[in-house]
Amino acid sequence: MGVEEKIQELIQSNDVVLFMKGNRHFPQCGFSSAVAKMLNELLPKYETVNVLADGEIREGIKAYSKWPTIPQLYIKGEFIGGSDIVRELYESGELHEKLGVQKKGAGADLSPAKLPQITVSESAKKALLDARDEPSLGLRIEIADDYATDLFLDEKQAKDIVIDVQGLPIFLDAGSAKRADGLKIDFVNGEKAGFRVENPNAPPRVKALRVKELKAMIDSGDAITIFDVRTPEEREIALLKEARHLDEKGAEYFEALPKDAKIAFLCHHGMRSRRAAERALELGFTQVFNIEGGIDAWSKDVDPSIPTY
């Protein structure tokens, strides 16, 4: 079977198929990740084809669609486009229509069911009250979707949710209020003076793991599963025998792991593996490590018999 026939069969035998770098669980480029994230939100299941694993498919799909870039999305045999077009269709609701799913309605009630409980230490409260030059100013707390938090003095806005903490007014938008319950704010004096924020709702973060630390874990029998997100060609050049290849079979193994399993990700220098680790966090895993410096650092600092490239 030629590459064109293989591509045709993939498109015709799947209602939704995404030709991408990586797979839906572990995209290996930002554009593929963006499209997969939208599809993951809308569909429980769809087919992905990892073009990094097959050079013929990678070049063949570009010729087949007459579209020069990856990713490429097909729905019921129709070529939809790449990342930018899919994003436009998603925002307009047309992608939902093509997939037969309902777009979440605008105007839904975003207010939290109850006011969040926020603790402000005496030192933080004093620093804030000393800093404001108008009694109408309060502490605005903005918490983004990824739980990055910003604090600053501001005036109350019409739609703000207002909380009084011992005479200090706190202003939050509805989205931030939903993410703020249990928030603790402190102020630390000294050389590294500044505000410290603890949010129990924030998701776990990717932990950095140096190659010598990984070697010690392996030698001690620590239960950690290592996933290699590099291409088959790269693994032929330099292989860490303890690492599973994150191909389709590796992805199935990954999906079967308990969410509290200790997992680490490896690539050439640590960039692709970080994206994979961040995706693992999104999927609910809580003990996630990125191997800093990748196989290159392992070769230089742990096992020089492994070639560098």
Image: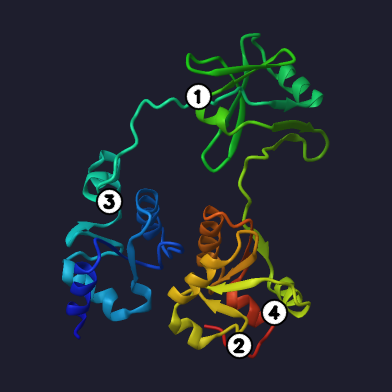
Q: Quadrant of residue 51?
A: bottom left
- Viewer-closest of 256 and 3: 256
Q: Which quadrant of the figure contains the N terminus? A: bottom left
Badge 3 or badge 1: first in the primary sequence: 3
Badge 1 or badge 4: first in the primary sequence: 1
Closer to us: mark 3 or mark 2? 3
Q: Residue at x 68, y 66 (%)?
A: 209
Badge 3 or badge 2: first in the primary sequence: 3
Residue to which mark 4 is pinned: 301
Residue to which mark 2 is pinned: 306
Image coords of residue 287 (percent x, y): 65, 59
Q: Amino acid at mark 2?
A: Ile
Residue 86 is marked as: 3
43 to 135, vertically: above or below: below
Q: Quadrant of residue 257?
A: bottom right
Q: Amino acid at mark 3?
A: Val
Disc 2 is placed on an element classified as loop
153 to 34, vertically: above or below: above
Image coords of residue 238 (percent x, y): 54, 85
Q: Are marks 2 and 1 in contact (CB under 8 Å)?
A: no
Q: Are marks 3 and 1 in contact (CB under 8 Å)?
A: no
Image coords of residue 230 (percent x, y): 48, 75
Closer to us: mark 3 or mark 4? 3
Residue to which mark 1 is pinned: 111
150 to 69, vertically: above or below: above
Q: Amino acid at mark 1?
A: Ser
Q: Is residue 291 visible?
A: no
Q: Left or right of 242: which side holds 36?
A: left
Q: Would you call the spot at circle 3 few (<14 residues within 10 Å), some (14-19), or many (20 or more)?
A: many
Closer to us: mark 1 or mark 4? 1
Query: Disc 3 versus disc 4: distance between alpha carbons?
Result: 43 Å
